[in-house]
Amino acid sequence: MKKYSVNKHHTLSELNITPLLDLAFVLLVIFIITTAPPVNDINIALPTAAGRPKEAPSKANYITVDRSGNIFLNTVPMNLDQLLKTLVDFRKVDPDLNVVVRGDSRIHYQKIIDVLDVLVSARIEKVGLATETYGQQ
């Protein structure tokens, strides 16, 4: 007869930490790569390169349609054909042309649609419609 029963489950005397170390080293490498090294540690005067100066942001051009249906581009009166030609010329100079359409609230809506059609024909992509805040009339 056995005095002692043999334990089939022996205790785990060592912990396998290899996967844990692999993870720690991967994280360490990621932090080393993503951290930017300081570049302002020595004061030097950097040379300047000949190039284009920074351009001022392009200002918006305003198309105004008054109560009687007259069309103005930046206070210059125009008809639809002149407006199209002028806008195409402006877009050739500045491909990032901004246009804001301001129409009188009492104007026939078709006039505004005609102006928007001219803007589409001139391939102007940045178009805004000016409005007033409710209650400021």
Image: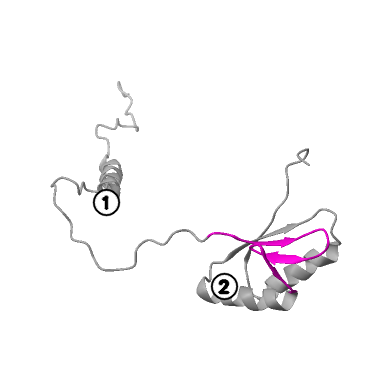
Q: Where residue 90 is drawn, which disc sits there?
A: 2
**Quadrant in the rendering for residue 2:** top left
Of the residues shown, which amino acid type is indicated by label 2?
Phe
Q: Where residue 131 is drawn, which disc sits there?
A: none
Q: Looking at this view, is 24 or 30 the one in front?
A: 30
Q: Residues within 10 Å of mark 1 (few under 14, many from 20)?
A: few
**Quadrant in the rendering for residue 47:** bottom left
Residue at screen point 73% across, 50% down? 131
Of the residues shown, which amino acid type is indicated by label 1?
Ile
* Gap between marks 1 and 2 measured at Cα: 47 Å
Disc 2 secondary structure class: helix
Residue 64 belongs to magenta span: yes
Disc 1 secondary structure class: helix
Q: Position of residue 118 (x, y in %)?
A: 71, 73
**Residue corresponding to mark 1:** 33
Give left or right: position of 50 versus 123.
left
Which quadrant would the C terminus be assigned to in this image? top right
Give left or right: position of 50 versus 80.
left
Which quadrant would the N terminus be assigned to in this image? top left
Q: Looking at this view, is 32 or 99 the one in front?
A: 99
Residue at screen point 19% across, 46% down? 40
| The residue stretch that appears in magenta | 59-79
Q: Position of residue 46 (x, y in %)?
A: 18, 57
Residue at screen point 73% across, 68% down? 116
